[in-house]
Image: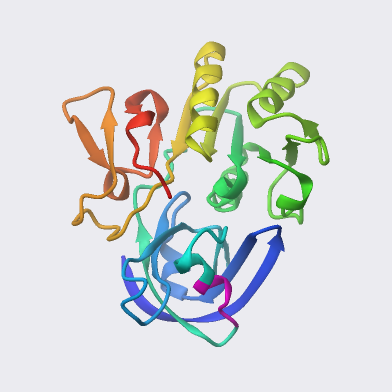
């Protein structure tokens, strides 16, 4: 893990209330594994006081990118950043996705800004020779950055304005019914309601599912104890998302115990 003052290389609005920010860091780019996150200080002031956690979204050479919605003061400050500005960044943090093992197809399911960890994961899996399919959903087409950042994307929108009409769980069912994925594993990130429905579906279909959890992680290193998730199995009653996650087998956790993102 490194703490650096980095220089912003670019900042863009890529869809409705969806922003990206790129910065240069050879060390973070080189050491980040799929599913890890950064803790970012939005401004050099005491307001806002706490850092914000963002999954590493894309890595291009020595450039690192995050993607986010504007939901409060901290993210609004980040959205106003421009090339040449500096940023205090800690990372990479957290345990990567557990993507090793014997399977042919990786199905990456995301909802909204849950798209965040999927490009890095998809790139690594494709480089290993696995088939990668992304199923990404939002309420409407305007909220999706359909610009080539996902491998083999299949989009789902609530209003049918892009791709499948319906949610990502129904889109996944349609994909499985019309294709032959062979031995498959599902990786997912998005709102808890989506993950819960996806967990029930994958259990019914006998599909392994690993989820990347979204929650507030003020310190990112286990000191503040602000991101507990209850464990459904094992000797530990709780673990911390920032140090033991954010990536878990969904059958190992009590999803409803997770603190709210907002």
Tell me which corner region of the image, top left, top right, bottom left or bottom right, holds residue 37: bottom left
Residue under the image location 25 percent in, 50 percent down: 226
User: Is residue 102 shown above or below 110?
Assistant: above
Give coordinates of residue 124: x percent, y percent: 55, 49
- The part of the chain drawn in magenta is 77-82
Quadrant housing residue 235 = top left
- Coordinates of residue 70 in the picture (x, y in percent): 56, 61
Residue drawn where x is 20% and y is 56% of the image: 224
Decide whether residue 138 is among the magenta residues.
no
Seen from this angle, which residue lies furthest left? 235
Residue at position x 34%, y 81% from top?
A: 45
Whether residue 216 sits left or right of residue 177 in the image: it is left
- 130 or 234, nearer to the observer: 234
Please name the colour scheme applied to the rendered image. Answer: rainbow
Q: Is residue 64 left or right of residue 87?
A: right
**Residue 5 x %, y %:** 39, 81
- Return the residue nearer the eye: 207 or 155: 155
- In the depicted view, which residue is nearer to us: 259 or 41? 259
Residue 100 visible = no
Q: Is residue 19 visible?
A: yes
The residue depicted at 43 percent of the width and 68 percent of the height is: 28
Residue 2 position, x and y percent, is 32, 70
């Amino acid at each position: 893990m490194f703490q650096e003052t980095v220089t912003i290389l670019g900042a863009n609005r890529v869809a409705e209330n969806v922003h990206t920010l790129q910065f240069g860091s050879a060390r973070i780019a080189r050491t980040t594994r799929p599913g890890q996150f950064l803790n970012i200080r939005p401004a050099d002031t005491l307001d806002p006081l706490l850092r914000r956690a963002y999954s590493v979204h894309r890595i291009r050479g020595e450039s690192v990118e995050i993607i986010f919605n504007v939901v409060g003061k901290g993210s609004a400050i980040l959205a106003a950043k421009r090339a040449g500005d500096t940023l205090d960044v800690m990372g990479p943090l957290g345990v990567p996705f557990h993507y090793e093992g014997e399977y042919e197809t990786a199905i990456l399911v995301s909802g909204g800004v849950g798209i965040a960890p999927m490009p890095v994961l998809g790139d690594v899996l494709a480089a290993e020779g696995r088939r990668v399919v992304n199923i990404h959903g939002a309420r409407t087409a305007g909220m999706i950055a359909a610009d080539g950042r996902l491998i083999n994307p299949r989009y789902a929108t609530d209003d049918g304005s892009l791709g499948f009409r319906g949610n990502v769980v129904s889109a996944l069912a349609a994909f499985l019914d019309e294709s032959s994925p062979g031995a498959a594993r599902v990786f997912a990130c998005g709102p808890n309601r989506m993950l819960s429905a996806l967990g029930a579906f994958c259990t019914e279909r006998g599909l392994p599912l690993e989820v990347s959890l979204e929650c507030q992680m003020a310190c990112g290193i286990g000191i503040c104890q602000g991101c507990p998730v209850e464990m459904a199995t094992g000797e530990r009653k709780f673990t911390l998302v920032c140090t033991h996650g954010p990536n878990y087998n969904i059958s190992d956790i009590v999803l409803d115990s997770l603190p709210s993102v907002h």
